[in-house]
Amino acid sequence: MVYPNRKLDYGIRMAETTKSFQEIIFDLQKYWAKQGCVILQPYDTEVGAGTSHYVTTLKALGDGYWDVAFVQPCRRPKDGRYADNPNRTQYYYQFQVILKPAPTDPQSLYLKSLEAIGFDLSQHDIRFVEDDWENPSLGAAGLGWEVWCDGMEITQYTYFQQVGGISCSVTPVEITYGLERIATFIQKCENHFEINWNGQTGDKKLTYGDVLKRFEREFSYYNFDYASVDILLSHFADYEKECNKLLECNLVMPAYEQCVKANHCFNLLDARGVISVSERVAYITRVRALAKACCQAWCESLKGAE
Amino acid sequence: MRNELLIELFSEEIPARMQRQAMDDTKTVFKQILDENCADYAEIATYISPRRIAIRVEGLENKTRRKTDAERGPKVKADEEAINCFLKKFNRQKNDLYERDGYYYLNTSSDGQEISEVMGDIIESFIAKMPWQKSMRWYIEKDRRLSARWIRPIRSIMCVYDGKSIDKEIKSVGITTGNTTNGHRFLSPDKIYISTFDDYVNQLEKNHVILDFHKKREYIRNEIMKTAESMGLCLCDDEKLLDEVAGLVEYPYIHIGSIDEKFMTLPAVVLSTSMKVNQKYFTLKYPDLTIAPYFATVTNVPGTKVMFEGLERVLRARLSDAMFFYKEDTKISLDEIAKGLKNVVFHDEIGTMADKVERMLLLAENDDERRAIRLCKADLLTQMVSEFPELQGIMGGIYARVQGEKEEICKAIEEHYKPRGANDTLPGTDLGLRLSYIDNLDTLETYKKHGITRTGSKDPYGIRRAEKAIQRIQEELTRRSRTDRIK
């Protein structure tokens, strides 16, 4: 059987223009705003992913409709490389979209968003590659895909099935764009630090490296070598204590914020190298217990409101 | 009257690794359901592509057979009211009852039905009974409830009997069946109207969807081989990768790209593993079996210059990472790295890898064995093995060679995780055999001492694999010592 390599004529091909890092963000915000999303600002405490934002975790539970989109800076202390590896950093940006409930064809909405930021889909090979996602600290899990573009993963696409150990009664879809990856792709850069951030040329051009290289280096030293372990340990205990106390006071969102802080604290301790493999299980269990309690309290509060 | 039935469940992308099994499971389950519904047919065949599962039933009788069922009622000892209720439900008399195992039963029978009438139930049953490793539910907005479980959201269902559309509402997924499907997601996404299976296959192919999984898979293999041969290269066979890659395209386009010279200094196994695991690219080799600076890949749309550049650029990023790991790892000696083994857990209740190494040393019989034991677990702490766990042992051997250890020791470390399973070969060298033996022996004895066992069906710690390994190694060691004595 022979399947000839068909050369198709797509008609007039859009010349792909290059976009700066900030333009990509503006266009994504514009596109999702047009779809009816609330365009939020990032969660202002340290999180490992946009998923940890309460508008994802807490709002994924319950029956309410909820469409949001926002940029989220993410901190993953263990991923730091002292700015020596330009493709792996402990701080990076995601663009997070939550559509709850997932509409009839969210994949098409997503693909159109790629066109909105300048991808000519006829010139690229886009694939949905199986990837089921799990966040053990948050007790969250979902099924979905990594979206690949010409062999590179640019987005995580997940249908949440449970959060905080509780099943979602209205299935949300989470679309998480890897902004650096997308930018290197669109701008044809060899690595993240070369990304043109402000779209200027010559002296006025500012790259991702110009903006964040020092931040990356200094924080890698902090995360791996200099963070005070005793302070972090006592912080973790404090966040845990305060979270439980706030839950008793029925203040779910402040309690959840303490849980998120505890999680970041654990990530710092882990990066610092003071958590043994067996202890890690215990810490994750403690954070998950906090997350679960917050999610349960959240669900209870929704029942009460009806 | 016998006619052809064609069903298609059109969904979002089905995981590539599950497609083969799903094709078989579909056949098994659908057969079972047809039998349960007393539907007669000649043949059934199933098909799968990334976004669709299709079932073709040839010679399906247009009416189901008369069905007899035994309905179980209340216990014989139950009171009058319960028995009367049961009788009333089926509109029968007391003398229709018969007893079995202490219960009352009624024989009910239903007339055969038009196959089109029961098609809704048949499809509902199929969705409910299909076994997926993992499954999900999605929200049906118009009904304000969650759907039944399926691997990914179902978007449409096609049901055509005798060339005509059967329209039934499948409540569990909120979809009404029809006679349409869609072509390739990007190349031909529009709606297509279907009447027969042959029509289905032809129209799908015209719309850039290859329905026959095996044909698609073999086409990919042959095309890569042909193109490679024309460049004086050969394809490194990889059945699992071929399965996966086939399951990721609706219509395959083959490309060969090149690898930058500067990366060819990396060990071949690192290049190969990074390309396969990160990018799903096939390795190509020269006739003398050395790795070539080329890779083969399959895309879902025709290649463009922009795309080829992208495919090569992303590989450069991945191989740059691999070079970074290699450089960082080789900055420190394995002895130095091995000091960190006290922080690597062997088993939660037993202890660390450092403990294991100490125990293994007690089983050593000479200096070479001791040296190999001291170094063989160090690579678990390297960046390369953290990134590619499948390279454990292999990287240890490579890094040992880099730092100038005896060749026998390097080889032993490299192969000491063999045999990885029943189909894997044993370590080739004597030292490698001994090292694997000592490693597995320690694992088994230590588990035994701490009461960790396996059952016939549950063996989370791989005890059976270790037992088999020891058995095979003992046999081989005996065979070798006998041969030595003869010499």
Image (cartoon, grey):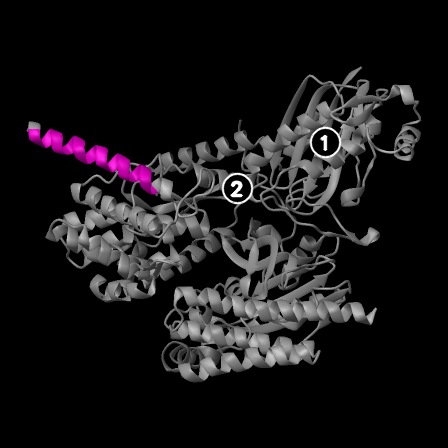
- Total count of labels: 2
Q: Which mark is residue A226?
A: none
Residue name at image x 71 percent, y 62 percent: A99
Q: Nearer the viewer, residue A236 or B308?
A: A236
Q: Is residue B108 left or right of residue A47?
A: right
Q: Amino acid at mark 2?
A: Arg
Q: Give residue B196's position: percent from left, percent from top.
A: 73, 25
Q: Give residue B280's position: percent from left, percent from top.
A: 45, 47
Residue at which label 2 appears: B17
Residue at which label 1 appears: B7
Q: Nearer the viewer, residue A201 or A65?
A: A65
Residue name at image x 58 percent, y 59 percent: A156
Q: Give residue A292's position: percent from left, percent from top.
A: 62, 67
Q: Nearer the viewer, residue A291 or B156?
A: A291
- Please tell me whether residue B247 is drawn above or below residue B214 in the rendered image: below
Q: Residues within 10 Å of mark 1 (few under 14, many from 20)?
A: many
- Mark 1 element type: strand
Q: Residues within 10 Å of mark 2 (few under 14, many from 20)?
A: some
Disc 1: which chain?
B
- Please tell me whether residue B351 is drawn above or below residue B221 in the rendered image: below
Farthest residue, direction top:
B1
Residue B401 shown in magenta: no
Residue name at image x 17 percent, y 33 percent: B478
Residue B484 shown in magenta: yes
Magenta stretch bounds: B466-485
Q: Give residue B324's position: percent from left, percent from top.
A: 33, 63
